[in-house]
Image (spheres, rainbow, N blue to C red):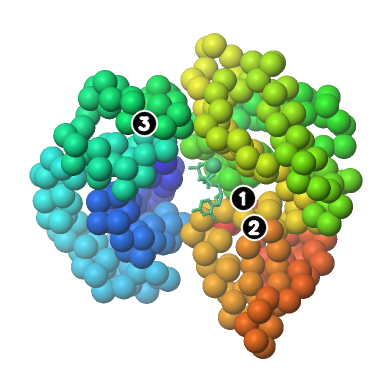
Amino acid sequence: KRKNPFTEDNPNHDFCNFLMELAEYEKNVSRDIHKYNVYRKAAATLADYPSRIKSGTEAKCLKGIGDKIGKKIDEFLATGKLQKLENIHGDSKNEAINLLTRVTGIGPAKAHSLVKEGITSLEELNKNTDKLTHHQIIGLKYFEDFEKKIPRQEVAAIEKLLVKYIKNIDPEYKISICGSYRRGKSESGDIDTLITHPSWTSDKVDKKHKNNMLKNIVNVLEKCGLITDTLSLGETKFMGACRLDLEHPVRRLDIRLTPHDQYYCSILYFTGSDVFNKSMRAHALEQGFTLNEYTLRPVGSTGVPGEPVEISSEEDIFDIIDYPYKKPEDRNS
Ligand code: DCP
Ligand code: MG
Ligand code: MN
């Protein structure tokens, strides 16, 4: 599970680090998603900033950074640490909750309840797998592998295999690796794969057919040894694990199957970043549109969304909501 996506060299990475630690604390321990988003946004903004921030005042000029975070930057610059974080780390209950949420499938609520039962380490978790779902057991099994970042060239090698095996089922399948890889990052937390097929549109095909399409793809990828485990498999979403070969760690693999007419909204969503998606959706709303991973629709005067707008490229979506086009590499904040 991603802890800090801003590890790549940037002149403000130490600020990003403490902001992401605060973000994780708010999400996992306080369960305050609003504060989590505020810290995450601030970290994304700083990670994107090309030069070293010299004071809280300077930082406050940037989007998403206010008084409180400005003060924290000043404290960090003056003392090299944050008292708030020192206090958080000094509490073993917080540390246990933070550790357990690093297992994929264990969310803040589950982590709280495990810690309440006295389960505070991975050893104890291993002795209590009866309390875990299949997803969480696989998460625990590959705890170390799943925390390793995936080098870009390994994602590219897995992409090649995915394309080869899936096109072998039907050459008309279109496969795109999205997420941080499409944003050009040198390493990724997982592999986000979007699949579509020109003859499959949202109005045409029944659920049964859709169901079998993804199941069939997953089956094939399992048979050839690329997929090692399934965390969850639905009609349009697969979450699981894959491995290039025995010399490489097991990696988290997400697959989404999308109808052809929803492809551009899907690829936009799945490319992210999550912080960028939030900004873009907020902008869409200001322009009277509701944007999600499936469609772009005008918000009618009654508040009921209208018919989806026809879209034939990612650029279309930016144009329609009057948002300056950003290449995937520029969608980090
Ligand atoms: N996404 C989103 N909101 C979320 C989770 C995901 O908008 N809460 C979208 C944007 C993400 C994309 O899905 O970029 C893929 O999700 P990941 O969690 O795989 O994130 P990334 O690929 O961006 O980063 P990483 O390298 O950590 O996987
Ligand atoms: Mg990803
Ligand atoms: Mn993912």
Q: Is residue 66 above or below residue 155?
A: below
Residues 262 and 162: in front is 262
Q: Position of residue 97 (x, y in %)?
A: 24, 42
Q: Residue at x 73, y 76 (%)?
A: 306
Q: Which residue is mark 3?
A: 132
SS label for mark 2? loop
Q: Residue at x 76, y 24 (%)?
A: 165
The crowd level at tag 1 (other Cα within 10 Å; few <14, some 14-19, many 20+) is: many
Where is mark 1, residue-wise? 270
The answer to the question of whether label 1 and label 2 lie on touching residues, with beta carbons closer than 8 A, is: yes
Report crowding for label 3: few under 14, some 14 to 19, many 20 or more residues within 10 A (C-alpha). some
Mark pair 1, 3: CA separation:
28 Å
Q: Which residue is mark 2?
A: 293
Q: Nearer the viewer, mark 3 or mark 2?
A: 3
Closest to the observer: 38 or 61? 38
Question: Does dot 3 land on a helix, a strand or a loop?
Answer: loop
Q: How packed is label 2: few (under 14 Cα within 10 Å), some, or many (20 or more)?
A: some
